[in-house]
Image: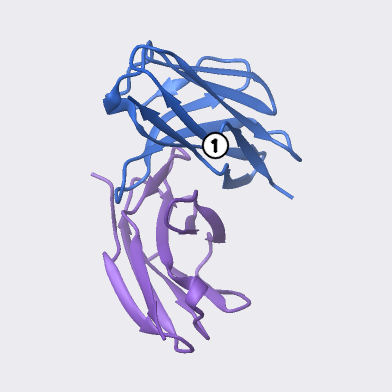
Amino acid sequence: GAVVSQHPSWVICKSGTSVKIECRSLDFQATTMFWYRQFPKQSLMLMATSNEGSKATYEQGVEKDKFLINHASLTLSTLTVTSAHPEDSSFYICSARLGGGEETQYFGPGTRLLVL
Amino acid sequence: GQNIDQPTEMTATEGAIVQINCTYQTSGFNGLFWYQQHAGEAPTFLSYNVLDGLEEKGRFSSFLSRSKGYSYLLLKELQMKDSASYLCAVMDSNYQLIWGAGTKLIIKP
């Protein structure tokens, strides 16, 4: 149980384009989903926390207009990187938490974004 | 401020035992997590401790002392596939996860 999927696993795009990444909890309903970014050999960096049906809470320094998060259902959250630039190239990982006293975050497999 | 400390890198021998320590200073405490992250992959959940003591799960055990702000992850009968980074994370009073930088564990034959 507690499987989280992400799609796509790899994205290569041109500078200026927008990229959408999907995160799905496959066998449970996630009240809260999280989006992280990880640069090579660095720690996980939390970008934002999203609760189903409400606006995402962004961490300091993360531009909400650039990284659009939609948590439309209890099993799906999307991250859209708008007008991507080479510095946005990174490993984006989502996680989902069941809630209701179950605090463990289960991670998706991650999405590698390369912006040329 | 909130702080999680763990060693940057450790080396151990296949078949041996290794202990990875984690100390923390956070605003409140709602549990401590250990995750394993292989290079190029997302983290996978290993353990969750919220009460003092030792939790054993197969070859892996995790210990917590809340009064000392200290935890360790113990790996027994090390295998080559255990080479990975091990992340310590503490959930604070706001139920936010505070992440350590991770300990890279290198297993040698």
Which chain is indicated by disc 1?
A
- Relative to B4, is A54 on the left or the right? right
Residue A113 image-quadrant placement: top left
Residue at position x 50%, y 52% in the image? B43
Tag 1's secondary structure?
loop
**Looking at numbered disc 1 in the image, what kind of residue is underneath it?**
Ser
Q: Nearer the viewer, residue B41 or B6?
A: B41
Residue B92 visible, this orientation: yes
Q: Colour of chain B?
A: purple
Residue at position x 50%, y 48% in the image? B42
Quadrant location, the C terminus of chain A? top left
Picture layout, residue B28 above or below residue A60? below
- State the image coordinates of residue B25 (x, y, percent, origin top left): 29, 54
- Relative to A97, is B23 on the left or the right? left
Picture layout, residue A83 above or below residue B101? above
Q: Nearer the viewer, residue B39 or A33?
A: B39
Residue B106 image-quadrant placement: bottom left
Q: Residues within 10 Å of mark 1 (few under 14, many from 20)?
A: some
- State the image coordinates of residue B54 (x, y, percent, origin top left): 53, 75
Residue at position x 30%, y 20% in the image? A85
- State the image coordinates of residue B107 (x, y, percent, origin top left): 40, 78
Residue B54 visible, this orientation: no
Picture layout, residue A114 above or below residue B91? above
The type of colouring in the image is by chain
Q: Nearer the viewer, residue B76 or A14?
A: A14
Q: Nearer the viewer, residue A63 or B2?
A: A63
- Relative to A59, is B31 on the left or the right? right
- State the image coordinates of residue A87 (x, y, percent, origin top left): 27, 27
Residue at position x 62%, y 15% in the image? A53
Name the residue beneath numbered marker 1.
Answer: A9
Q: Residue furthest left?
A: B1
Q: Colour of chain A?
A: blue
